Amino acid sequence: MKHPLGLAFVAFVFAVGMPGAVLAAPGPVQAVNPNAPALPAPGAPHYTTNPEVCLKNGGDPGDCVKLNAGNAIAFYWSWNCAGKSCAIAGFHLKHAGGTGARTVIRQFGSDPSLVDSSGKPLLLENEPGGGWRGACYVVTAYRTPVQNLVNVGGGAVHPEGTPSGSAAESAPSPQICVGMTSQDVTIPANLVRGYDRTYWVLYSNNKQQIQTLPAGTSLPLRIGMEFFAQQGFSQTNHFYRAAFAFDLSSVGGNSTFGGNFVYDIASGTDCTDAYQAPTGFDSATWVAPSGGTLPGKKTHSGSSTSVPIDALVQKWPHSKPLGLLLRETQNAEFIQSGVIPPAFTCFGLVTNPRLILHVGTTV
């Protein structure tokens, strides 16, 4: 990879430590010439797990999108150079400690710290076996002797003449050590709706009556069910549901690796299951879930309930609001006004609905 004199640019490479194919060697190893014009060291490297940042810093769209899988890192850095020495072959990404890396290409002898070389096809691999946390890296610029290549037909080339120039490698950049590769972002509900429906029956005529109240629009909201029976006279069954909308636009182009739907029970008991809310729930007075129960198992910590929704938020477009619904475990449409013992009564007040998303980060 050659660059015009005086070029300032950002170099980009994916780095990992999983065994894989080795790039073709560029020819015999060349000793570094200590008298060659010095190459300036690259700027401090950065890393990201966000495709949007990856693209802005020179990554290929087909590679950057793979950061969404949550186990790769894109490293990038700046380099400023002026003069004849700026005609370089590329950059090396190395372990700062000089140990434990797969060697992709050895340009300057057997360097065990070499992880990857930019200026070559991008390499996208899984994180090292020991994980990313605590691993430190530096970047160097390197130059190799240049030799003319003559086309000999059939797509083949042959070197001709004596190589010109000499091998050289810059001092290493400042090191970057990998800490967190994701962060938690809390998104409060920006819209809430509470639903209240009553079924009752007088045993004198066994005629069912239904009353649906206007939807509530503020917290706290009642969830669950209440059953009242007057022996030999009537039964009244109340059902309460709550739905919430979350605006994910603040996540932007960041990767979303997973998340949880979290809410608090201010008083009472949580007797609900979590679902996706149906389209139009914000203007309805009574709603049914969209699809089946969210598959994540609820966990409780104090007054807070957390429902894992990894699969849902991983695929959910950030430009589209996400609606979630809490519906009573004893389905109102099934029970209606049957004779249900009062012991089934179970309801609570829900407050502080929020999403806690695990998203990508840039350092």
Image (cartoon, rainbow, N blue to C red):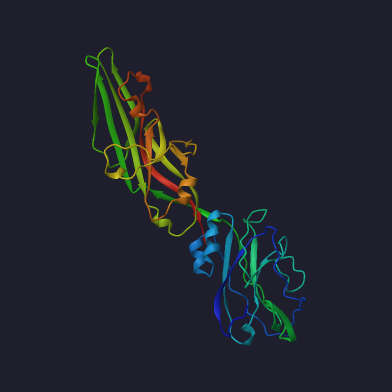
Vertical placement of residue 215 versus 92, above or below: above
> Looking at the rendering, in which quadrant would you find the C terminus?
bottom right
Which residue shows up at 52% across the image and 56% down it? Answer: 68
> Where does residue 264 sit, x and y in percent of width and height?
40, 38
Vertical placement of residue 242 versus 130, above or below: above
> Looking at the rendering, in which quadrant would you find the N terminus?
bottom right
Q: Which sits in the foreground, 206 or 177?
A: 206
Q: Which sits in the foreground, 126 or 358?
A: 126
- Horizontal arrangement in the rendering, residue 208 relative to residue 169 (left or right): left
Vertical placement of residue 275 versus 198, above or below: below
Q: Is residue 363 visible?
A: no
- Horizontal arrangement in the rendering, residue 55 relative to residue 225 (left or right): right
> Where does residue 285 sit, x and y in percent of width and height?
26, 38
- Residue 284 position by quadrant: top left
Vertical placement of residue 83 versus 228, above or below: below
- Horizontal arrangement in the rendering, residue 78 relative to residue 170 (left or right): left
Q: Which sits in the foreground, 177 or 5?
A: 5
- Outermost residue toward the left in this view: 205
Q: Is residue 341 visible?
A: yes
> Where does residue 129 sit, x and y in percent of width and height?
67, 53
What is the tally of numbered marks visible in this picture? Answer: 0
> Where does residue 119 sit, x and y in percent of width and height?
62, 73
- Residue 125 position by quadrant: bottom right
- Outermost residue toward the top in this view: 232
- Horizontal arrangement in the rendering, residue 269 relative to residue 297 (left or right): left
